[in-house]
Structure formats: C-alpha cells, structure tokens
Amino acid sequence: MAVASALLLTLVGAVSSTVPAGAAGATPTFEPDPSAVGTVTLYDAAGQPITSGSTTDAPLATYYKASGPKVGSFAFNLGNVTLATPQDGVPTNAWTTAEQITASQNYTTAQAGYPAGLTDPTSNVVIKGLASDETLAAHIATFPSASTLNAGVYQIRVFTSSSAITYYSADIKVTGSIWTLVYPTVAVADATSTALAASPGATADTSTPVVLTATVSDSTTPATKPTGTVTFKDGATTLQAGAAVDASGIATYSIPQSTLGIGSHSFTAEYTPSGSFSGSTSSAVAYSVTLPKPGPIVGASAGAARVGAASSCSSGSWTYAGGFTFQWFLDAAVTPFASTQSSGILPAAYLGHKVKCVVTAFNPSGSTVSTSAQVAVAAGAASVAKVRAKILGTLAVGKTLIAYRGAWAPTPTSYSFVWKRGATIISRVAAYRTKAIDKGKTIVLIVYAVRAGHLTGVSASLPVKIK
C-alpha cells in the first residue's frame, strides 16, 4: 500500500508536472479542526483517491467522500462543498473567507452509477463534483491566503446539513498552480495491471476446453501480491465471476468444451481488488473458435457386393461431419473405379474379385478418411422365366420336337437346352427327333438362361408323353 502524505511528489489525474520541493508543508496549525466532525477524501472519476492536482481543475475532485453520515436535524439529504482560506487568530468556524464551490445537491449513501468503493448503504456521504464547479484558482483570486502560520493552505469543507459550523474537512496547500493534500494523510491503493492469456494459442475447436489465465501484478515499489477476484468476460458477456486470485497473483477459468460459439471472440479479465489495491482490466485477447475435423464413431462399411445389383457403402456415424464423398476400389488397386457415389452397379467382370469403399467426411475445418473392409463380389441374380419353357411339335415317334425357351427378365445373353427321358439326358440342342425308344415314355425340356457374372436361370417344361 502506498501512503500519500505531505511528501507526495507525483500528481494524479490530468496533472503531470512535479510539485516543487517543500511545497507540501507540514500539518496545518489549526488541525485537528475542533469544528469538523470528520475528514474528507478526494477521488477521481474511477473512484481512486487523489492527493494532488491543478488549481484550474473543474471540478477540483470528481467525488468528495465524508468520513461519516450527515449531521443536523434535516430529514432530507442535502450537501455541498465549500472552500475556506485560513485566518490567523480566528476560530475555524468563524472564518469569513469561505465560499460554496458546488451546487447544493441531494445525496444518498448508495448513489447509482458511482464507483463501487464510494457506495456504502450504512455510512459516509459522497458529494459529486461537476464541471460547472468553481475552481480553486477562482477561490484564491477572491480569498487569497494571508496566513503566516499556514501560508498557501486552503480548507475543503463538506456540509451535510443547514448548520454553518458542522462539516467534514480536508486541507490542501498550493504552490504555483499545483495543490497537494496536507491533511489528512490518505492511504492510496497500489496500482495494478492485469495480463490475460488463453490456451491453446489464439484458436481452438469446439472439442477443446479453453483455459483463461489472468495474472495480476502490483505496479508499485516495493510490489506485493494483489488479493481479490477476477471476472472473465467474452465481450460484454460474463463467463465467470469471482475467480479467486491465488498467492501468485493468478486466477484461472477453464471454458468447457462446446460452450463457445463458432467464430470470433474477445476475452478480457477484470480484477476486483480486496485490501489496498486498485482494480485493473486486461487488454482484450482475440480468439477464434472453429469446428474440429470430423471424427468417425462407426467407420465405413461396404454392403453385400453382387454383380448387377446396387452395392452400397455406409458412411458410418461421425462427429462434426458436414458431408461425405465416396470412392470404390477393386482388389489392391490404388485408383478408384467410382468417385462420388455411395452405391453403384458392379459389372460382370468383377465377379470373383473384392471391392472396398473409402468414405471421406468433411467440414470447413478439414476432412477425415474411413476405409471399409474388402467384400467379395458374388454372382448376380439369375434371370427369371416370366413364361416357362415348352415343348412344341407332334408327340409321336419319328417327329421333331422344338424347344420353346419361354420369356425371361432380365434378358439372358444365351440359352442352353437339356432334353430328358425320365432321368436320362437324351439331347442338348434346341430340337429333338423322337425315336422308337421314346414311345410311351415321358420327355421334359429344361432351358438354362445364361448371363455373364450372374447365376444361371432355369425353367422346365411340363412333361409330355410320346405316342
């Protein structure tokens, strides 16, 4: 914790010059002021104590915080800030060199929009300075210091009732155009800085947790480890509030996987102090969340492979797949025979070979390949006789019988014929001339329908008896 006193040299806020040596001076001779009921602390717009500034600042301070509640009998809350120039040999409550520099204003003990450190629901009063306030320089022009005991000293008074002799006070000393607090001594919070890092890197996919690490550092010398909490945000959205800062000044938050939307993000870490430290916010960390590449849960598989039939490749099941492409390979070939179809008709030439399918799953982040096991290619289905085979001709010895092959689907590429007398094959051509041995016997015609790569279709005629 840094202590601001009469020796403070660095100005706070808009002033950036150095206070001349010896300007601060000692505690004023009239302190402690017997007419004051407490002290006043000055704050900037961020709610941080200030102990020095310029005589031309308007307002002199953004906030004036009294060390206690209002005094007096008025039922409403009304207050203002007054500047007074000390008069040697005159009681403080009788100085005639005081003038009001802020408008009288209603106040509460928990003003909406005020910095958190300045709102207190049970005690203390805060008056807000405005740009229209009279400056310290204007007061000095009207009531310059004539004191020999307290040269250059001016008293700030916060009135919280109609009484002219009950107030809270603080004293400043002016050197040139610079004022410095000389009473009371104010504890100034140590300035801090917060750095934020995200892991992994600057991008992750939705399957990966993102870890945010905030490191809070004390910017004063000697530095101590800040205490308090960190709120992690994504833009204006709070991801995690109240993450404790550990003994090393570090707070972390792991964003669960799949909870960040795909696209651009902007992470920040806001440090809320406990103890004598000031708050700070990290620079924004730009981050990008993408889809992961597809991943197979159940891999690709080739269904039953059969000549002339639609053989299908199942893509299986995947995570994060946006679409699929398919390829088919024959035996050990490295060149596909089909590139994008999930199913296709296998030609007769593939009978007795093996096929496999390769599925490529893809999304905007990339692609992943899954290869099925090889499947043996089976013969295609046989042609089917829509009209059965039939024996034509005169059913008598010495007559020629003609084979009618019937009607088939799909159309065969060739036919073969078998004539049987009982269980005995008597011919393998399309016509048969009956013999004496056939008399009184039964003959049957069997037609075989042939297609390359397919099973053979069979159709038998009704039996006929030779006279």
Image: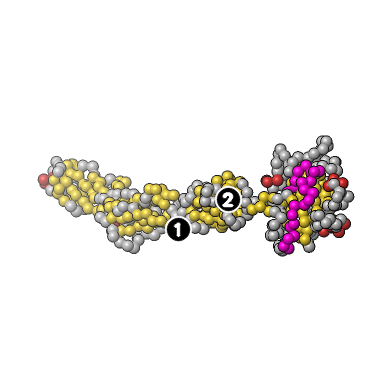
The stretch of residues the image draws in magenta is 19-41
Say what secondary structure mark 1 lies in.
Answer: strand
Q: What's the residue type where badge 2 is placed?
A: Pro
Give the number of the mark in front: 1 or 2.
2
| Residue located 42% across and 55% down the image | 361
Residue 168 pos. (x, y %): 78, 45
Q: Nearer the viewer, residue 85 or 48?
A: 85
Give the residue pinned by disc 2: 226
Q: Residue at x 18, y 44 (%)?
A: 443
Q: Earlier in the sequence, mark 1 or mark 2?
A: 2
Name the amino acid type tagged 1. Answer: Gly
In this rendering, does residue 392 appear at all? no
Which residue is identified by label 1?
A: 366
Residue 276, horizontal then vertical, whole percent: 63, 49
Q: Is 357 or 269 nearer to us in this picture?
A: 269
What label does residue 69 carry, if any? none
Side of 91 where 287 appears, left or right: left
**Most frequent secondary structure within the magenta stretch:** loop
Q: Residue at x 58, y 47 (%)?
A: 228
Instruction: Name which residue lies at 21% across and 51% down.
Output: 417
354 vs 271, left or right, is left
Per the image, label 2 sits on a secondary structure element best described as loop
Report if residue 25 lies within the magenta region.
yes
Task: Name the spot of residue 177 as percent of width and height, x first.
Answer: 78, 62
Horizontal side, residue 454 vs residue 170: left or right = left
How crowded is the residue under tag 1: few (<14 C-alpha within 10 Å), some, or many (20+)? few
Q: Is residue 128 left or right of residue 265?
A: right
**Is there any visible trace of residue 56 in the rendered image?**
yes
Percent coordinates x, y for residue 367 in the rendering = 43, 57
